[in-house]
């Protein structure tokens, strides 16, 4: 690896480290004003929204969340009537999690409210800046997905995206 590549990688790492708190701060503020659920619970609902049913281990793997943390979050979501536990008919040791209709409806509503708030903030940008942000976020998402997919194929770990 060349010195130039190492410098580029170091700058990318620094950017990613700086982006994370900015996203977290803005998203968490929006989330906290719209629901009593914490971000971890919403991430679980989001991953279940994209995948009809997942095991506890798959949820933890896709979200890089320790299994005890997944269990605690799922317990809260069950208490809210948003998800349910289902035993795998082929292996009773596997517990699958599925969103209920209430969970789907509530998640959709929360997502719409958060999107409305974020939309208001994004409207402050000029059209050219919006186009730049769209291109940048699309590219970052694509590249990070590629890195994670390659990493999981080589290590045998799950695909977290």
Image (cartoon, grey):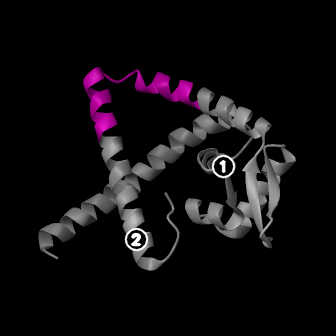
Front position among marks 2 and 1: 1
Residue at mark 1 = 52
Mark 2 near mark 1, Cβ–Cβ under 8 Å? no
Give the residue displayed 81% in from the left and 51% down from the top: 84
In the rendering, at what x and y percent does residue 86 appear?
A: 81, 58
The residue positioned farthest toward the front in the image shown: 90
Q: What span is in magenta? A: 114-135
| SS at mark 2 in the image | helix
In the rendering, at what x and y percent does residue 129 appear?
A: 28, 28
Residue at mark 2 = 151
Give the residue displayed 27% in from the left and 34% down from the top: 132
46 or 24, which lies in front?
46
76 or 26, which lies in front?
76
In the rendering, at what x and y percent does residue 78 appear?
A: 83, 50
Cα separation between marks 2 and 1: 25 Å
Residue 66, picture quadrant:
bottom right
In the rendering, at what x and y percent does residue 17 appear?
A: 39, 57
Main SS, magenta residues: helix
């Amino acid at each position: 690896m060349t010195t130039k590549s190492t410098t580029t990688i170091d700058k990318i790492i620094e950017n990613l480290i700086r982006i994370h708190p900015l996203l977290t701060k803005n998203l968490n503020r929006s989330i906290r004003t719209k629901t009593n659920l914490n971000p971890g619970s919403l991430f679980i609902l989001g991953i279940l929204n994209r995948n009809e049913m997942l095991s506890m281990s798959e949820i933890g793997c896709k979200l890089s969340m320790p299994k005890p943390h997944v269990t605690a979050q799922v317990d809260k979501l069950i208490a809210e009537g948003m998800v349910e536990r289902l035993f795998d008919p082929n292996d009773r040791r596997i517990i699958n999690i599925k969103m209920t209709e209430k969970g789907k409806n509530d998640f959709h509503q929360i997502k719409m409210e958060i999107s409305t708030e974020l939309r208001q903030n994004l409207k402050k940008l000029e059209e050219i800046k919006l186009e730049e942000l769209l291109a940048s976020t699309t590219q970052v998402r694509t590249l990070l997905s590629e890195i994670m997919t390659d990493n999981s194929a080589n290590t045998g770990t799950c695909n977290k995206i």
